[in-house]
Image: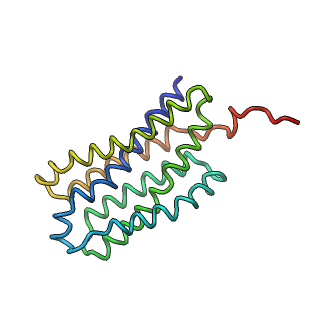
Amino acid sequence: LHKMLIGYAFGFVGLEDKMTDKYMISLAHPQLIANFGVVSSLLFSITYSTFGVYAGVLSSKLNRSAMLGLACICWSLTSIGSGLAPSFTVFCLLRVALGLFCSVGYPAGYGLIADYFPPSYRSTANALESSGSYVGAAVASLSILAIKQVGWRACYTAIGAAGVIWGALFLLLVREPKRGAFDPPCEQ
């Protein structure tokens, strides 16, 4: 039960953190236009969708817990960097990096779920992880209040700092499960 609760909690909150950063750019749009003159969400989307395939291949071969924890730390550091970006060029490069690191989330996360949970619990675990993206969108929507008060840079920095802590906790608490532990025996 303990390992299942850890898996549920980290899948949900980690995905929520990742999705908040992704959605927050649309809410910070007016301030980004004022600061940089353009918005760079296309760079994130292209990188994310391209590297998701490679992240899937890597998560089939490497330690998914380590990949996910490190990716969370890295995408969170890119959020902090985005809040501190001195120019549009740097901001765009950080959006590309964000897409690269976020692309690890689903392949490694769903792979971990398959090996952490028996088939009877997988639907619930997958649903909980997926719902994290919608909570992320909701948190991003609420961030508009903070953006108006403290600006988009402070919001990116705060979300990034929370994600770094979350990624570090993930690395400390979530271990790589045995692959295929719940797979049925092969028929010979």
**Total numbered badges shown on the rendered structure:** 0
In the rendered view, tell whether residue 167 sits above or below residue 22. above
Residue 187 in percent (x, y) is at 84, 35
Q: The C terminus is located in which quarter?
A: top right
Q: Nearer the viewer, residue 17 or 174?
A: 17
Residue occupying the far left of the picture: 149
Residue occupying the far top of the picture: 1
Write the residue at 29% across / 50% down: 159
Rendered image quadrant of residue 92: bottom left
Q: Is residue 119 left or right of residue 48?
A: right
Write the residue at 16% across / 54% down: 147
Write the residue at 49% across / 41% down: 172
Q: Is residue 90 left or right of residue 188?
A: left
Q: How is the model colour-coded?
A: rainbow
Q: Nearer the viewer, residue 94 or 73?
A: 94
Residue 12 in percent (x, y) is at 42, 38
Rendered image quadrant of residue 29: bottom left
Residue occupying the far right of the picture: 188
In the rendered view, tell whether residue 133 sits above or below residue 48. above
Write the residue at 52% across / 44% down: 109
Residue 8 in percent (x, y) is at 47, 33
Q: Nearer the viewer, residue 184 or 93?
A: 184
Residue 60 in percent (x, y) is at 65, 51
Q: Is residue 10 left or right of residue 56?
A: left
